[in-house]
Image: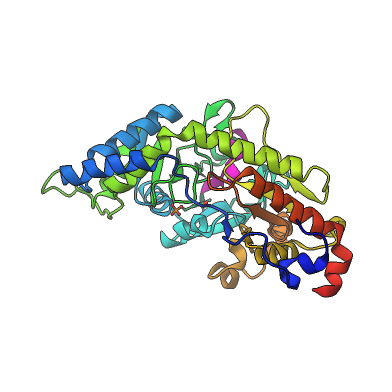
Amino acid sequence: MKHCLDDLALFGGPPCFSEPLHVGRPNLLKPHQLRTRIDEILDRRWFTNNGPYVEEFEQRIVQHLGVSHCVAVCSGTVALQILIRALELTGEVIVPSFTFVATAHALKWQGLTPVFCDIDPGTHNLDPDRIRSHITSRTSAILGVHLWGRPCDVDALGQLGEQYGLEVLFDAAHAFGCSYGGRMIGSNGRAEVFSFHATKFVNAIEGGAITTNDAELAGRLRLMRNFGFSGYDQVESVGTNGKMNEFSAAMGLTCLDSLDAILEINRRNDRLYRDCLSDVPSLSSIEYPKTERQNRQYVVLEVDPDAAGLSRDQLLKLLTAENVLARRYFYPGCHRMEPYRSLYPDAGRSLRVTEALADRVLLLPTGTSIGDDQIEIVGQILSFCIDHAVEIRRLL
Ligand SMILES: *Cc1c(COP(=O)(O)O)cnc(C)c1O
């Protein structure tokens, strides 16, 4: 507990935590289940090339999400790249800038032009009203991102897609186990893409998947992830190596086995943070749609710097010194990273909400490796800093 300014680690006190608290520490509740599966893989000597665990992982996802097809691959980024290529998109694709840079990179990698569209300040997702002004004769698709697991306005994006003849896809990297309109995310648009990176809700160490109800598309994606092979000696088209390996699938399955327990922990952490910060109105926790399922994988605060008396970056510095390694996702926004910054130096003019949020959002450590006491201490550090903002500003 911090009692005076000298107690703050930034000003010479001992850090609150001797071991750092991380954002995105991997979830693994039952390591023994993983060990059992790994032993089986070692005994089978079947390490990759569509092994039994990869097939089981795909089947479990199909069941969990209520979607027809799941194509598991080696990462979320490769999932995006393969999907974009399989759909033969051309020209420009409308995408948010407030997302992990892989969303934009996957387009650029495929020779497409990401066109950054501003977001809704309430949902942090693509603002459907703003999309229209970015549509040109070169636009081929809209790529929405269900940021923090909060669903995009899928219906509005679908209507725009229909009206203008555009493909509608979703980067659902954050949204495994979340719903839109009461239905699990995974079936929206032409296809949706998941990431099973170690930091995500379902962790396969590295991994990703494309889910779709389009059987023909799923077939093409399967060819593409395996060099275009349709049989032992038969190649149908240009492909790559996007295969998921058995060890990743084993981790993914182990995570799916404990999904309810992980979700319960995420919910509890989220509730505890909200309680701890309920009398700090300058730090607002994002709201989730009450009627939808959520995974609560991210604890996201918006810092109001005027009301708090400290900026998001000042709070980050104070927390980091205490070994609370909070993160400012997705600062500074794709459009202010290379190559996009040089390509579109004026993009910021139409991305006011993105730029404001990129300066205000702070993610706190959550997940299965943080305890209630630790969350309470993080809450206390934040309230203490804001209570003493005036003096802290003088010392910074
Ligand atoms: C994690 C993430 C990706 C990339 O997934 P990888 O599995 O790390 O390649 C893409 N988009 C978003 C929004 C992400 O958070």
Residue 153 colored magenta? yes
257 lies above or below 48: above
Q: Specify the color scheme.
A: rainbow
Give me the residue at 34% from left, 42% from top.
34
Position of 211 relative to 382 (above/below): above
**Residue 295: in sight, yes or no?**
no
Question: Could you say which is closer to the camera, residue 210 or residue 215?
Answer: 210
**Image height of 105 relative to 286, above or below:** below
* Residue depicted at 89% across the width and 65% down the height: 390
Q: Is residue 205 magenta?
A: no
Q: Is 362 situated left or right of 266 in this image?
A: right
Q: Residue 282: x, y in percent?
A: 82, 51
Which percent across, then down, holds residue 269? 63, 41
Q: Position of residue 302 (x, y in %)?
A: 74, 51
Q: Nearer the viewer, residue 288 or 4?
A: 4
Q: Quadrant of residue 360?
A: bottom right
Tell which residue pokes out farthest to the left in this image: 233
Residue bounds of the magenta highlight: 141-157
- Quarter occupied by the N terminus: bottom right
The one of 228 and 256 positioned closer to us in this rendering: 256
Q: Tell me which corner region of the image, top left, top right, bottom left or bottom right, holds residue 17.
A: bottom right
* 194 over 110 or under it: above or below: above
Classify residue 258 as left or right of residue 128.
left
Position of residue 387 in the picture relative to residue 319 (left or right): right
Q: Is residue 115 visible?
A: yes
